[in-house]
Amino acid sequence: MTAGPDADDEETNRDPPAVLSIGAAAIDEWYAVSNLPEPDGGAFAREVTSAFGGVGANVAVALDRLGRDAGLVSRVGDDEYGRRAREYLAETGVDATHVAVGDDPHTRSLILSDPGGERAIVTAGESFRGLRLDDAALAATADADAVFLTAYAPDHVSRRVLDRIAALREGETADPPALVFDLSGSVEELVDRGTEPETVYRLLHAADLFVADGVAAPAFFGSAADAVERIAAAQTGTAGSASRSRDGPRGDSTWPRAVLTHGADGMTAVAGGEVSRFDAFDVDAVDATGAGDAFTAGLIDCWIAGESRGALADGDDVAAGVRFAGAVAAINCTARFTQPGLPTRSEVESFLAERGYGPDGSR
């Protein structure tokens, strides 16, 4: 394995990123289909093209577009796909110092997107699954203000990040990094591919922010309603002895702030045991691919990377943060592909102002 081409002397001497994203930098092979086929069904692709994606890269590029310092820890293939991914990252403001190159085929996703913006995704390529955190990348997690981790990260990577952050919190570090965890896929999809269920439970006790979509949350907790109930109970320490026996990020038994996304049906935020439901912004959606990653980046921007990092948001802060993140995701849906449609901060602020909200999503 070799270091990425951006890891020259100038890159090595850069200040550490404020937010370090650990995840794939994939190539999305995008099929605009007439419909999402049922089992044994068919569809016609009126257009086939490719774009840049991957949960880790999507979040890093989204934060960069919002004006945050962002870095990416990933592994790409030593092939044409991997070369394109590296060249693209070099054109962004994302610090790619810790993007390694391996011999495996580059990770890429086949995306079927119907005329309404709904999609189905199949991922192939072993490059990201072969990610190993070297000492330099692990040190970068300690230097960052916040670390984003997707459940698609290999389990040994997630466990090493958890151990490192736990050591920092237990040691003399005055300001250890905040941890953001995205339960990116269902349990069945993650087993033997990404973070294992036991590690997910560790992350739920260690994270400062937890995000899950309408597929991942029910698959892990049993149902969407069970997910909300269990998270709210765990946040207030009423979830039973098993939950109370484990320490959270601040030495207590509480779980992190959480947001469960439901696509066009909105979002459910759970903070301090309080449950709040929010509608999604109504836009003419072109492509919903990556909207969840855009939303997560918006939450990180408001709740984690801002001045209030580490403090439990009150009701007003929760609502404003969800609105801001919802605006980032909504704008992203109005353009084809994920990363080309990621908005700048000024675009998000204008979007919110047109709907009667302040630049941070407040009323």
Image: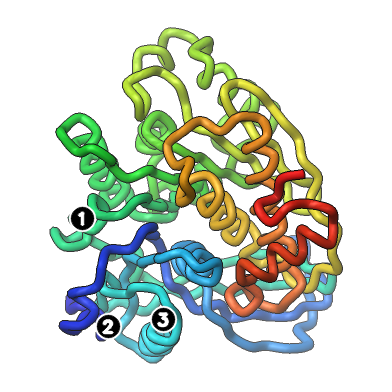
Whether the residues at callouts 1 and 3 have beta carbons within 8 Å, the answer is: no
Residue drawn at (42%, 37%) of the image: 310
Residue drawn at (63%, 38%) of the image: 317
Which amino acid, by three-letter code, is at mark 1?
A: Leu
Q: Mark 3 points at which residue?
A: 89
- What separation in Å lies between label 2 and label 1 (alpha carbons)? 18 Å
69 or 167, nearer to the observer: 69
Asked whether the viewer can see residue 162, the reply is yes
Which amino acid, by three-letter code, is at mark 2?
A: Asp
Q: How crowded is mark 1: few (under 14 residues within 10 Å), some or many (20 or more)?
A: some
Residue 15 picture quarter: bottom left
First in sequence: mark 2 vs mark 3:
2
Q: Mark 1 points at which residue?
A: 138
Whether the residues at callouts 2 and 3 have beta carbons within 8 Å, the answer is: yes
Asked whether the viewer can see residue 123, the reply is no
Q: Which mark is residue 6?
A: 2
